[in-house]
């Protein structure tokens, strides 16, 4: 494991008991609730008002309301190996941001504009900051974490050629950050496995403890050298190998064992009105765009590629006519 | 003028009468007020509670509270010419972001960590969004603007070698976005001149109408193709040529005729604690860093360079011992 | 009309064209959209991303996000007459507040705890503040209004005996402020009729222009004497006569002609856990509680009372088994 | 002690070590910092960026940013005895609210409009909520508390005759809630003494443990029966006996041993513009107003009354000419 573990004692946010908080729509209204962990009602959601509901089909609102969202470019060894052919991409982690308007809840839609071709999934876990944090050391950083969420850091790679690396338009469009179903604490994240699914088939898979290059404590200490993190801020911790493009109707999921399984459906919308006037950088299909959209298949496990191809024909019927 | 002007009629936000709103500290408490435009009290601030104060030496809080801050890389022809040797840098504008924690008020401090050398000024105007805005055309975009502010998009160029173009650490550190003194409407921005001052000497200067490559209406329509802008969001509109580094004790100002003059003082702080542990990308002094920090003097008017050098010795005395 | 009307010219917020903005859940995700006013698609909602949806059965989120919510006790002559037997209740308006956590969207649930009996409707219009506002005169106050929404100021009258008049628990519980469907401008509010419906039958009805004792301009100028109103703040403008109690399963609606029709369903939940420990003021059934819950039938038009009684047996079947 | 104490073990928020966080203006910019507890720098503030400053004369911003502020009417036995002549005012606590715009920082101004006479102090401690909280029991409520702050719940008693008990205008005007200097945890609140000072002389004094009728755990459990409390929300816990009026130039302080000493200066401003038009309830000087403004001297310890009178002539000179 490429990580300064095990700890003498787990940080509080990773010690049990497990707690998961969700914000859902029931009967048209929004409520907070806590997942029931044990007993015959395990898996049901106890709303704070006392009612118990089955959350399976509910609309979920994002369980976070961050003032800023910062994402690590690469922090999994398999992605570094796929894209850079080496075990770590750079000496130290690098970052970009996503705007709060990109937030989306579990069971929602990921919008794919009609003039874009390459909408890539990236299955990740998000770290939610619990208190104001600046100028801390890695060992101190754990205390600043409120919990963890599954997240999909979706990207419209058609805009890879613009923004000079900031990826504002690649990663910043509305709906490109499904997060949830809930925010979880009490789980040892480094013993978990992270997966992405396309139409039910596994297309990304990584043991977090084995693949992590820089943990959240390192990333927080790095960022907080000069940037104050405040309660509610979200850090996206990167994705393992095999980020690939998905199509309208596809169901994309991020699963983190012990934390949760986040689902979203790709939905096509029209190109924006300003596109007809030629305003702004048009989506492109350059070599660089395709390099990122297609990745490097030669350095990806065969079963992920096989599943990805099989999944293209496994689109749920109901999504075809989805309005 | 490289701009689709004149308008048959000016957008409302640029038509008179002028109005400037500021948020200041008086006697230890924060108040909103309106600048008095005419008469013998012109230039004083009328607090909303009726009192009149001289705002000259007051602490000013940022007059905005954005959920996101988006910045144009280059939208002035002189900067495009300086850095790219051509009148427009790219076919279409490109963008990056700054986090809300970088916000700072008029008359504040810009922090320069002791392990960084190249803290560059960029004098800009900020556009403040007035209502939710998505999928609009350039002509419609003017209605989404609440007002304009002077702004300093400061950058720690020592981090130019990291973050793969997102510039999170170059542009995102705490205090790196002084903005104000107020938010202004009722001014035809395209008839104004934008300047930066170092210790009172002009070091950037551009006629906004003559230099603008893409106006705020174009930028809003471009961004809002895929990203919802919400009331309070801030767009930084880029800087003209001659962004250069400043030193602790320097007073840096952004002046926009008709809009206001924003001031800040560079203040040195210690390197962050995590630096001693080698956490994160260390500030570097590479060719690329120096290229951006130093710019291209051969394509900059002589008087700006002369002033910049003269200003190095014109630091206000009081700032030497500033605590 | 008991109102300083007509105006030489209508305030901008009441002049056409009509515009209605809503925030809805489509396919599990939240979107802003604008109601289509004319043509064959009139009544459909154009999402900002270009899609057109039928909003009828959609989950609606509250179209506002206020930092404070202030409510007028009485500003309709029929309510003053019902409860005080005189045309105006007091020389000047009086106010209370509701917390932001009481907000609820169109088509949602109003929660009635099992230990409470008297959940009263009050059909109102809400004024949404558009910009910072302090120390203004009534004529100036119109410019501070962003729009209007239908609203239901629900109250658990069982708590009438506590809180010494603040009504925090009467009016402040979660879900007790349905608001929407959208936020509307471009309608002359004083030509509209406000109604409440119980299970489809009219139980409150007032012509706003004829009944208004104090208009929003007066109320804003009154409040802003000492309290700064900020963009997004909500003012609830009071209700006409015949506020009465509703039961689980009842559908309660607020309709304002030209503005919209807001719907919510009463849903019973268990008494709070702390009730079993005797924590806090228990719901009571005192004379004062009943005085407010039942009102004064002798001063209410017969058709409203008839409808109210008929509505008790007109509960939609589907609500019986509502989970 | 009228309280379910001692605990087998103190709640975490009351166990050491002590931590105090403040937000201050240094050199015109806002920073978070932590008070230094021990050693030769004890009492200085370590800014998060590493600098150490003496906070004594600094502008302090409020250390909280609540979405709602709820206040207990009476929860100290001495106040119950003063105003009701019995040890507890009611069987259960009652509440009112203050808007977020009433917030004010340490070392600030409390505004007294020229048409008001009776601006009363109430020295209190504030409870800051640390996480979403609904339907909890008193024992569980402690975990929802992030910390405590000194607070001054100022009131313009001239408006006592309006608002039918909600006290919106008595307690809700801008600047009427000084809070700070910081937010503190790690102190056993029930072993502390709460005081108010007028111009340096003690005018309220109570041992919190001995006087508390309902502790914060009870109040949270009570409120959270029906109202969701969210992170950042503030609960004001009431004041002991001898709330009295203060005058322009007076320095009013709230001290809580172990927690901090909050200071503010009363500043007169003009009556609001709308007052000249007769808009809204005018400040009155009725028997009820005077009853609350003057209190019941016969049930107040002599030294507090003596100090109050002596303090009237102890106004700091510098405040006379305060602008």
Image (cartoon, coloured by chain):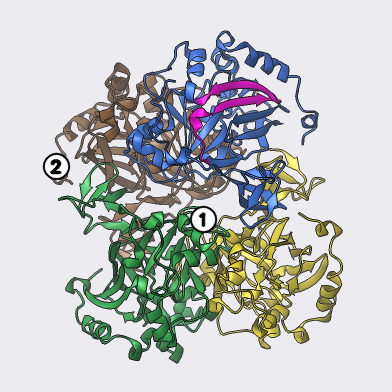
Chain colours: A blue, B brown, C yellow, D green
> Does residue A233 appear left or right of residue A40 in this picture?
left
Residue D126 x %, y %: 40, 64
Nearer the observer, B247 or A131:
A131
Chain letter of disc 1?
D
Residue D323: image tag: none
- The x, y position of residue D155, in whole percent, is 40, 76
User: In the rendered image, which residue does mark 1 sit on?
Assistant: D230
Span of residues in magenta: A185-208
- Identify the residue under disc 2: B320
Q: Residue at x 68, y 88 (%)?
A: C85
Q: Residue at x 35, y 35 (%)?
A: A139
For the residues marked 1 and 2, what is the alpha-carbon distance in whole angstroms? 45 Å
User: Residue shown at 68%/27% (left/top)?
Assistant: A114
Foreground tag (1 vs 2)? 1
Q: Callout 1: helix, strand or loop?
A: loop
Q: Is residue A124 above or below residue C190?
A: above
Q: In x, y percent, where is residue D243?
A: 35, 80
Quadrant housing the N terminus of chain C: bottom right
Q: Secondary structure at mark 2?
A: helix
User: Disc 2 sits on a residue from what chain?
Assistant: B
Q: Residue furthest front?
A: D8
Residue B269 falls in image quadrant? top left
Whether residue D150 can be seen here: no
For disc 1, the neighbor class at 10 Å (few under 14, some 14 to 19, many from 20) is: some
């Amino acid at each position: 494991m490429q990580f300064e573990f095990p700890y003498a004692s787990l940080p509080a946010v990773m010690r049990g008991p497990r707690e998961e908080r969700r914000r859902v729509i029931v009967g048209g209204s929004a409520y907070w609730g806590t997942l029931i962990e044990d007993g015959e009602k395990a898996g049901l959601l106890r709303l704070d008002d006392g009612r118990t509901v089955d959350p399976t089909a509910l609309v979920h609102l994002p369980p976070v309301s961050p003032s800023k969202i910062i994402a690590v470019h690469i922090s999994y060894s398999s992605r570094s190996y796929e894209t850079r052919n080496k075990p770590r991409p750079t000496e130290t982690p690098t970052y970009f941001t996503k705007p709060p308007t990109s937030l989306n809840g579990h069971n929602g839609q990921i919008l794919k504009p009609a003039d874009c071709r390459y909408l890539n999934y990236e299955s990740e876990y998000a770290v939610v900051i619990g208190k104001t944090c600046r100028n801390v050391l890695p060992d101190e950083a754990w205390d600043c974490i409120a919990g963890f969420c599954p997240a999909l850091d979706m990207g419209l790679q058609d805009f890879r050629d613009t923004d000079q690396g900031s990826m504002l338009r690649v990663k910043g469009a509305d709906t490109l950050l499904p997060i949830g179903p809930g925010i979880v604490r009490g789980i040892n994240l480094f013993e978990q496995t992270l997966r992405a699914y396309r139409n039910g088939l596994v297309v990304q898979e990584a043991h977090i403890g084995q693949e992590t290059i820089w943990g959240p404590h390192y990333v927080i200490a790095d960022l907080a050298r000069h940037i104050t993190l405040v309660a509610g801020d979200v850090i996206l911790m990167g994705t393992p190998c095999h980020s690939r493009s998905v199509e309208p109707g596809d169901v994309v999921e991020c699963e983190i064992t012990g934390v949760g399984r986040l689902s979203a459906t790709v939905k096509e919308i029209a190109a924006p009105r300003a596109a007809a006037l030629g305003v702004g950088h048009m989506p492109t299909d350059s070599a660089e765009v395709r390099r990122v959209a297609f990745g490097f298949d030669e350095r990806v496990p065969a079963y992920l590629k096989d599943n990805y191809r099989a999944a293209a024909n496994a689109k749920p019927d109901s999504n075809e006519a989805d309005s």
